[in-house]
Image: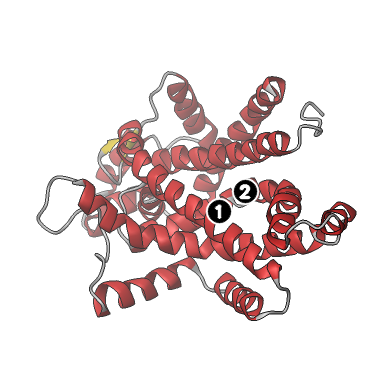
Amino acid sequence: MARLVGRRALAALPVLLGVSLLMFAIGAASPFDPVHAYAGSAVFTASEETLAQLRESFGVDRPWPAQWWDWFTGALTGDLGDSRALRQPVAQVIAERLGWSVLLAGVAFLLTLLLGLLLGTLAARRPGGLVDRAATSLSLTLSAAPAFWLALLAIWLFALRLDWLPAGGLTDAGSTVVTPGQLVSHLTLPALVLAVSQTPWFTLFVRESLLAALEEDFVTGARARGLAPRTVLVRHALRSALLPFVTLVGSRVPELITGALLVETVFSWPGVAGATVEAALAVDFPLLAALTLLATGAVLLGNLLADVLYGLVDPRTALDG
C-alpha cells in the first residue's frame, strides 16, 4: 500500500504542474483584464500611464509563461503571491479558510455516506415496496435539483418561514466570537444541503449493488442455512456491496467540491470555495491558481482514498497493480 501511495504522489506532480500551466494560459486568453477588475469604475477616469503602472506592478504585462514561472518559483519557496481581491497573501487566505471548508465538506460527506447507506439498504430490502419506491423517487428527484436551488429552498423554509436556523454566515449578527453553539447552528443548514445534494447517487448505487449481491450464490446459501433475513442482508449482501461502493466515494469528490463551492457562496460560509468565486469574479489569478491546485489535489486524494479503502475492504485486491 505504501508503494501505491508513493506512485500516486509521483504521478500527481505532473498533473498539478499541467493544471497550473493551463490556469495561466486560460488567464492570458481570457478577455477580462485583471487591472480593470481591480480598479473597478475608477478605470474610466484613470490615465493610460496609471493603468500601465498597475499592469507592471501586477506582472500581467508580460507573457503568461513568464508569469507562470515567477508564480511557480515563488510557490516552491512557499510564496504563493498576494490576492488582489482580498488584499491578503494567498497563503494567509487559504490558511484562514481551509479549516472551515474541511469542516463543512467533512460533516456533509459523513452525513451523505450514512444517509446513502441507510436509504439504499432500506430500499433494497423490499424491492418494489413503499420504502423502495419512495427512496428511489426522492433520489431521482433530488439528483436533478441543483445544489444552489436546494440551498435557496432551505433558506426560504428553515430560516425565513420557520426561523429554525440562521440563513448564513459563521456567527450571529454582531458577534465577533465563534462559539460552539453558533458554529453548530450556522453549520447545520449548509451541511444538510450539501449532504442532500450528494445522497441520491449513493442511495441509488447502494440499492443496485445490494440487489445484485442478493442474487449471488453465497447469499442464496446463507438463506438456505436458515439465517435471518436481516443477517443475510447486512452481514452478507451489504458487505459484498460495499466493495464497489468505496470506489464511488472517491469518484464523488469532484462533485462534492463543486457542490461546496455553490453552497458556501449561497450561505456566505467563509471557506476556500467562496474565495474561489471571489477570485474568479475579480480575475485574481494568483489566488485562483492556488485554489485550483488545491481542488485538484483534493480530487487526486479522493481517488487515492477510494483505492486504499478498496484494498482494506477486499485484501485480495492487488493494490500494487
Q: Are marks 1 and 2 in contact (CB under 8 Å)?
A: yes
Residue 129 picture location, percent across and down: 68, 79
Is residue 195 found left or right of 44 in the rendered image?
Answer: right
Kindly indicate the quadrant of the structure image that contains residue 203: bottom right
Q: Amino acid at mark 1?
A: Leu
The colour style of the image is secondary structure
Residue placed most toward the observer, 204 or 76: 204
Closer to the eye: label 1 or 2 = 1
**Residue 270 in sight from this viewpoint:** yes
**Residue lying at the far right of the rendered structure:** 217
Residue placed most toward the observer, 289 or 54: 289
Measured in 3D between alpha carbons, the distance from the residue under mark 1 to the one under mark 2, in whole angstroms, is: 8 Å
- Is label 1 in a helix, a strand or a loop? helix
Q: Which residue is mark 1?
A: 113
**Residue lying at the far left of the rendered structure:** 174
Q: Which mark is residue 249?
A: 2
Residue 46 picture location, percent across and down: 22, 52
At x 32%, y 71%, the residue is: 155
Residue 268 picture location, percent across and down: 30, 58
At x 59%, y 72%, the residue is: 139
Is residue 64 found left or right of 223 in the rendered image?
Answer: left
Screen quadrant of the C terminus: top right
Total labels drawn = 2
At x 72%, y 79%, the residue is: 128
Q: Amino acid at mark 2?
A: Val
Residue placed most toward the observer, 154 or 60: 154
At x 39%, y 68%, the residue is: 151
Does residue 111 lie above or below 321 as drawn? below
Q: Which mark is residue 295?
A: none
- Is label 2 in a helix, a strand or a loop? helix
